[in-house]
Image (cartoon, coloured by chain):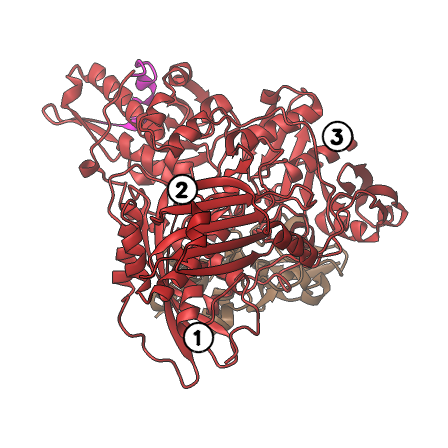
Amino acid sequence: MRRALITESNEIRIANESRRRFLQGAAGLTLAVYLPAASAETATSAKVPGGVTFEPNAFVRIGTDDTVTVFAKHLEMGQGSYTGLATIVAEELDASWAQVRVEGAPADAKRYNNLFWGSAQGTGGSTAIANSWEQLRKAGASARAMLVGAAAAQWNVPANQISVADGVLAHAASGRKATFGQLANAAAGQPVPSEVKLKEAKDFKLIGKRIARKDSADKTTGKAVFTQDIHLPGMLTAVVAHAPRFGARVKSFDAAKAKSVKGVVDVVQIPTGVAVLARDTWSAKKGRDALAVEWDESAAFKLGSDQIMARYRDLAKSPGLVARKDGDADNAMSTAARKIQANFEFPYLAHAAMEPMNCVVRLNPDGTCEMWNGEQMHTLDQARVAGLFGLAPEKVFIHSLYAGGGFGSRANKDSDYVLETAQIVKAINGSAPVKLVWLREDDMRAGYYRPMFYHALQAALDDKGNPVGWTHRLVGQSIVAGSPFEQMLVKDGIDAVSVEGAANLPYQIPNLLVDLHSPADIGVPVLWWRSVGSTHTAFSTEIFIDELAAAAGRDPVEFRMALLGKHPRHAGVLKLAAEQGGWGKPLAPGKPGERRGRGVAVHESFHTFVAEVAEVTVKPDGSLNVDRVVVAVDCGVAVNPDVIKAQVEGSVGYALSAVLYNQITLRDGAVEQTNFHDYPLLRIAEMPVVEVHIVASAANPSGIGEPAVPPLAPAVANAIAAATGKRLRGLPIASDLLKA
Amino acid sequence: MITIDLNGKSTRLDADPDTPLLWVLRDTLQLTGTKYACGIAVCGACTVLVDGQPVRSCTTPLSAVAGKKVTTIEKVDAGRVGKAVQAAWQKLDVVQCGYCQSGQIMSAVALLSQNRKPSDADIDAAMAGNLCRCATYMRIRAAIHEAARSLT
């Protein structure tokens, strides 16, 4: 079941300046937009349950009970952002890790904007730690300075004689000591420092060390609260009948049978379908199943996946918009000693987070609105819900909860399921709080997929086998066209996320052309999916470069290294992964009939550099085991190495599902998959051994939630080629491709 | 009216006997540690113990557990094995998003209750029905071995 596409004018736009500057590598960005004014405004001593507290800025609250609460402006959807953000604050504050707790910050773009997104609050693009780094260090350091100031005043000693460690301030000469909690009240009266000195890396006590995640205890005892777990007094649960094809609308419906289901309270039409409201989820589902809906499919999208791909292959025959042009690639092709070409095809992919999309919305009698959500796009969702109810955005309060995975799905550019929840509340005139529950089938068929893509690559080699020309044509829907992100990410018709990883190919090839077709007539909603454009560009480029190495009769690592002269961080991770992965050493043979191989790939995404060496075994029946993956990562300062390691391990497993199984296919416009039986995810026995090596770096931290995804598929594909001689030309691997 | 022994307490329920145990736990009793993810018993997020055996509560009608002993994540720490598994999970920081982990832990507790020294193959078999989209599988495996060590 699927919803009609929601289209609307987009008054909400994500500003681009800071991101662009960041993309260009300009230094000092976060310093420039640090919030001294907001800090000054919000330094406060507030009466809250538990006593007087000290809130030196928007990110830290210190209670008289010695609790240090860090407000996380980013969603925790598994990537360890709560832990990482709190680590940064605690480090500069010199708190003990045990006294730190984390709370999701509410929607408040003035205080909690993503510094790479201008004035919008939200999480994505592996930016949580990267954009918060300086901001939270300063937040922690200024809180520390105020505590020190308070102690100095109370003890009548110079501030520079006071030391702070593990949440305790001490003056050695006089032997005086006080905890954060004991000084919280006095510290609130201290001026917010206009400048603070940050620690040198050699003095870090928490950053770079293995410290425990803050969410482990609650997530292993069932106490962690996800949106799905919200129960409010009088709350109704809604399950929605969506159209079977994108773009279809409700023509008519008969609610009689649905209303006769015990527990069903109401049935209402909304722009995206028909919602059944019940006292509990099971009744709502039974009611939805009993509903008879007739759909108006006059505007529905009715092509199948095969037809879409055929169209893309056709489009690839003509030039697209130029995303990068170095030298004269056409001339290089026509004069080449040798040419190589390869085409690649990629399916739609569903995010398939374990927690299907859901949201809770309540309209309060005082004219405010509350939302409970694993909130990833605070400012957008807040503005849209406010707009629907005719409220000022600040009247919509968002309770930011844990998300049971996201991988892009909760960063919906159209506010999709959030707005659907609000529409249901509106349809019942706000008479009850509503929890929207998408069942797995609803979630799987909801669209907002990683777009289908077609890539055509050609390379020109000179008579020694050196690459002298490279052309890369991509065909696929733009994710951001028509969305609030368009202004930030589309330039001269090129959607940056369509060509990321292709237009910034790191290999030094004198004549290079990357061009793009972004068909706008495909009615399937598309969205970012963990690592976005790099999900497909890393695959085609890293397989193709491997083929060029083979054509030149050269070692794949050595061949790449020779072309990475201007990209030392790529070269650094490639070298490390090759060393640790035993590159060049013979693989242990498999059992009789098994073919084994080792493959490599290197890719940069979100300013993080990752190389992976995969070892595979192809069995006589064509089935594939990925046995071991050795990963080298350069993500700048490693704030929490164990979280980084976990993200890499998980990214390998996540990416492997897409290599082995994942594809959303359409037949006559209708999605064929419904649940995990026909959209299988990796299971424990299929998980490779993953070894993670982190490059020591003093560079500002970049993200780690996504960048280990892209190199996995091409590394595996290159290992398969080493084992079998067969080159993959798309994903997932066709079931009969690898039979002996 | 159906009576079950839920987390050590005799509990009388007047829900429709056809209602899946999952929704009785989550919506009627507000024991929300047990998760909904697929509804068709292919992902294991809803795993609870029924008389010590791992059961997918999303496809188990309430009537099927009448008179039986049901344990959920909320009280799995009442047993030595449950405590050990949760401690190992925390020690190794297994969780990422965490949504599947209640089910993973219940399956691991069932395994270790019957097999105090599981091999990798035993773990693969016992945990095959529990999906983790974050792919925390390496740490799940390590944590089960860790819990096994702590129990000997």
Q: Which mark is residue A426?
A: 3
What colour do you see for chain B?
A: brown
Please name whichever residue, A606 or A233, is drawn nearer the observer in this view of the structure. A606
Residue appearing at x 61%, y 41% in the figure: A230
The residue beneath circle 1 is A724
Q: Amino acid at mark 1?
A: Thr
Q: Amino acid at mark 2?
A: Asp
* Snapshot quadrant of residue A391: top right
Viewer-nearest of discs 1 and 2 = 2
Please name whichever residue, A591 or A293, is drawn nearer the observer in this view of the structure. A591
Residue appearing at x 20%, y 33% in the figure: A200
Mark 3 lies on a secondary structure that is helix
Residue A391 left/right relative to B101: right
Work out which quarter of the rendered image holds the N terminus of chain B and state it. bottom right
Mark 2 lies on a secondary structure that is strand
- Image chain in red: A
| First reached walking from the N terminus: tag 3 or tag 1 | 3
Chain containing the residue with disc 1: A
Quick check: B14 above or below A521? below
Residue A697 left/right relative to A727: left
Viewer-nearest of discs 3 and 1 = 1
Q: Amino acid at mark 3?
A: Lys
Viewer-nearest of discs 3 and 2 = 2
Mark 1 lies on a secondary structure that is helix
The residue beneath circle 2 is A326
* Snapshot quadrant of residue A37: top left
Q: CA distance from mark 3 to mark 2?
A: 54 Å
Q: CA distance from mark 3 to mark 1?
A: 59 Å
